[in-house]
Image (cartoon, rainbow, N blue to C red):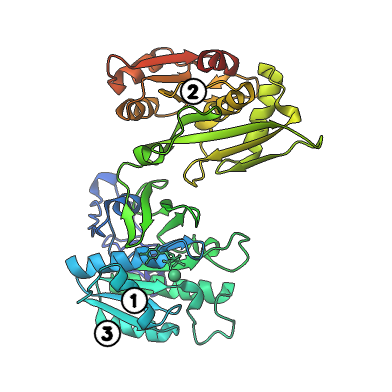
Amino acid sequence: MPQSPAQQRRQSMLGISPSTHNTHTPILLPQIKPLVQERIPVGYAEMDRVLGGGLVPGSLILVGGEPGIGKSTLLLQVSGEIAKNVGPVLYISGEESMEQIKMRAERLDITGEQLYLLAAVELDVIIEAVNRLKPALVIVDSIQTVLAGHLTAAPGSISQVRECTVQLMQLAKTTQVPIFVIGHVTKEGTVAGPKVLEHIVDAVLYLEGERYHSYRLLRGVKNRFGATHEIGVFEMQGEGLVEVTNPSAVFLSDRAVNASGSAVVVSMEGTRPLLVEVQALVTPSNFGNPRSTTNGIDHNRLVMLMAVLTKRVGLAVGGHDVYANVVGGFTIEEPSIDLGVAAAIASSYREKLIPADMVLIGEVGLSGELRAVSRLSLRVREAAKLGFKRCLIPSAGQGNRLRNEINDANLPSDFKVVTASSLAVALEIAL
Ligand code: TYD
Ligand code: MG
């Protein structure tokens, strides 16, 4: 029996191509033909990886980020590449005039023979233009400016943003044109934006970083066509966003080697290990009301680590102000950096250096124990690759597995792997 229009519409909204099989009869797994997904490279390997190997035709991808972080710049650069290498691109902006976009394009050295600009906000106009032009790629900048005429709600309101996204999803599916929509998020998260759209679109990428730092992280948080949690690293320069292919080396390049309170940790960002420096500063509290602040690290995690240092290691950090910071302006959520953060605090408190050639990996538990982390061999290998000579890791419950992981890492002969069962033991070794 053929599928009903409603069924087809639902499937296309979910990104499933209409199946040739009868949907009412169960089918044996081996008899189902695999879906061959064509991929279009966007011209930046750092972005292709986050997309899961390039753009999938007919996909709707949300690119979110704070205003001013570089979303328009990134997608104009991608437009330039696709227009040069694949086919016509339609860049629709409700935010800037065509002249402003042209100025940016000149700064980015985009000639754009196949790049069409459209300054429009009405959804009908946008859909018509896409249907007429049938471009290889469409950019909608931004979803907060698009208006579906039949709704009276204001642009940027939840109902507008949701309705427009649903319609753009249908447009992508029916035309098989991939569409990027830009969405602003504010720190307060007040405006209707990316969060309400995440479940509608095929993929969600966030462009992160601090406005006054030059590095930008493109992070995949949802992807129907690939793995999530991959990251791409860029640097904002005068001529736009430039790929950073060896981010660990770049992040560590400014490290002050002879400073206390500094530790190097390895965070897994998707499939890629990233070495970054964490810093801590511990100072006696003047007002009897100790404060702690963090940048790039979860504050609750810092408070927990301070409690463990106090109770399990005997460091009286409680009466001190503690500041902890991830260098480069990034946020790291992985617990594997616990050991590094705790060691940086202890290093500042005791005014003792952690060896400059040592990397610290491990999650800290409430009993002060060091807990195993995933993908150890990848992390350790990356540290060795960047010239580190020592690595402090948890000995926790791994036995043979630990030995195998270290063997897998294929380390140089002068690289030492040191294990510790608890934070207290690890600090004895590191400081
Ligand atoms: P933009 O892409 O407009 O941000 P968004 O679309 O996320 O709001 O980027 C704006 C910032 O980037 C602006 O402060 C200027 C800076 N920038 C550069 O440093 N170099 C460049 O080549 C470009 C185009 C922008
Ligand atoms: Mg913009």
Q: Residue at x 17, y 65 (%)?
A: 85
The span from disc 1 to disc 3 (Cα, nearest Å) is 26 Å
Q: Residue at x 19, y 77 (%)?
A: 113
- Within 10 Å of the Cα at label 1, are there few (<14), some (14-19), or many (20+) other Cα atoms? few
Residue 136 image label = none
- The reply to whether the C-beta atoms of the residues labelled 2 and 1 are less than 8 Å apart is no
* Quadrant, the C terminus: top right
Q: Assign a secondary structure to mark 1.
A: helix
Front label number (1 vs 3) = 1
Residue 132 image label = 3
Residue 103 image label = 1
Mark toward the start of the polypeptide (3 vs 2): 3
Q: Assign a secondary structure to mark 2.
A: loop
The span from disc 2 to disc 1 (Cα, nearest Å) is 52 Å
The span from disc 3 to disc 2 (Cα, nearest Å) is 56 Å
Left-right relation of 299 to 138: right
Q: Quadrant of residue 302?
A: top right
Q: Amino acid at mark 2?
A: Ala
Q: Amino acid at mark 1?
A: Met
Disc 1 C-beta below 8 A from ligand 1: no
- Within 10 Å of the Cα at label 2, are there few (<14), some (14-19), or many (20+) other Cα atoms? many
